[in-house]
Image (spheres, coloured by chain):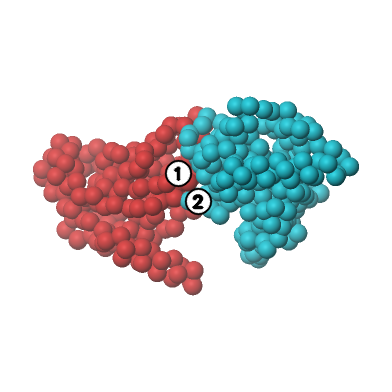
Chain colours: A red, B cyan
Amino acid sequence: MRELSLILAVTLALSACVPGRVQVDSMSGVGSDELLLVGRIELVPPLDPREQVLGSQAEELRGKAHAVIAGKFLKLDGKSFSTYSAGTIVELGRDFYVSQRRTKELYYSGSIVLTRSTARSPDPDWIELPGGIKFSVDSRDRAIYLGTIRYHRDAYNGITDVEFVDEYKRANREYVKRFGEEIKLRPAFPQPVKKLQAAREELQHAGESR
Amino acid sequence: MNSPLRIAGVLCLFLLLASCSPPIPKSPPVAGAEVERMSMVFGYIDMADAPSNLTQVQMKRMRPLDDKPYYGFGVKDGLFYRIDVPRGAYKFTKITGVKWNTVYNYKLEAQGKGDLDQNVQKPDLYFAGAWNYKPHKKGWFQQDEFELTPASSPSEREVLERILAVPGIWDKPYDLPGANGSKGELRS
């Protein structure tokens, strides 16, 4: 058990060195086979700095979420929450702009690292943000707006509600300021939460039966 | 759970046990406002089916936020107890055991209010329950999993009686037998 903990700690330490995808600030950072994704993740009540024990090497995760947006559903858990190259670190409560390889469908999952594993404190801790959220992509899309995903939590960090908030007008204004008007930002909202939850469970069952 | 009568009842029980047990527990050397602010959180885990015994129990104060949120417990024969717990929402995060020279850490559900977790709103006794460790073998090259299932016994009263019978429990109420440290220390 101790060996497994050590392996897990080393794996997490190494994986923390991989930043995943970085945010882009111009369309030149988006390849011809890629999309620009625009969205926002919020946590209610917001994260307090005292909730995150990160250490100097992982300070970049403070006040941020780890979002995984990929062409297939990826279940985040403690063993793999920061190991996907599809992952990106986004600031909570602010719009993100990331490039994404073009696929017909996009799946989102998220987590927030609360305690980073260290030699002194090998137990990682995190808040899993329910994922399995699907967005459809049109073949003509170059930039799509995913909306604001607002997670409500209780005192025990249980996610009690997930809201999808349409802030397209505001987000589009910011987008135009940064990227210009040449490429339109298309809203691509997800399905209603209940359907998403059912879809998520279905995906989980499918994954387990494989 | 939340009645002042319960505290009085336990104190009566304590006095009763004190009067008939050979190892005479001393009265707690805490009094007045200090006592009025404290709560006791306690419970029991049967580790008979676990690969180790039980040596540590840890809970985290989730609200209000605290710079040192981790609380250790006194542990004895599956019993766990802590008597100086202030108001707050608490989540049990980890239990630990030892067999031979190997330390076993069992991480509990990290998110959402679990069955053991407590919301300490006013000074009282908070029973985190009696539980059985149930292993789930996952096979070669996979880490075994486990769950804590409710135990039919001991009852809350039995757990309290056993705790009160622990020799020396009132000698150093802030340095409980088996606690291996004080509030706020992160232990692995």
x, y percent for residue A33: 25, 54
The residue pinned by badge 1 equals: A155
Q: Chain of mark 2?
A: B
Is residue B2 visible in the rendered structure shown here? yes
x, y percent for residue A117: 56, 40
Q: Residue at x 56, y 46 (%)?
A: B2
Using residue A193 as the reference point, say whether residue B161 is left or right of it.
right
For badge 2, the amino acid type reads: Lys
Using residue A53 as the reference point, say whether residue A147 is left or right of it.
left
x, y percent for residue B175: 72, 32
Residue found farthest to the bottom: A209
Between residues A142 and A58, which one lies in front from this camera angle? Answer: A58
Q: CA distance from mark 1 to mark 2?
A: 8 Å
How packed mark 2 is, by other alpha carbons closer than 10 Å (few <14, some 14-19, many 20 or more), is some
Q: Judging from the image, what secondary structure is the residue with disc 1 in? A: loop
Q: Residue at x 28, y 44 (%)?
A: A40
Between residues A185 and B182, which one lies in front from this camera angle? Answer: B182
Is residue B102 visible in the rendered structure shown here? no
x, y percent for residue B188: 65, 40
Q: Judging from the image, what secondary structure is the residue with disc 2 in? A: loop
Q: Residue at x 45, y 44 (%)?
A: A155
Between residues A12 and A108, which one lies in front from this camera angle? Answer: A108
Q: Are marks 1 and 2 in contact (CB under 8 Å)?
A: yes
Q: Residue at x 36, y 67 (%)?
A: A198
Quadrant housing residue B163: top right
Using residue B36 as the reference point, say whether residue A48 is left or right of it.
left
The residue pinned by badge 2 equals: B113
For badge 1, the amino acid type reads: Ala
Between residues A38 and B173, which one lies in front from this camera angle? Answer: B173
From this view, report whether residue B107 is shown above or below residue B132: above
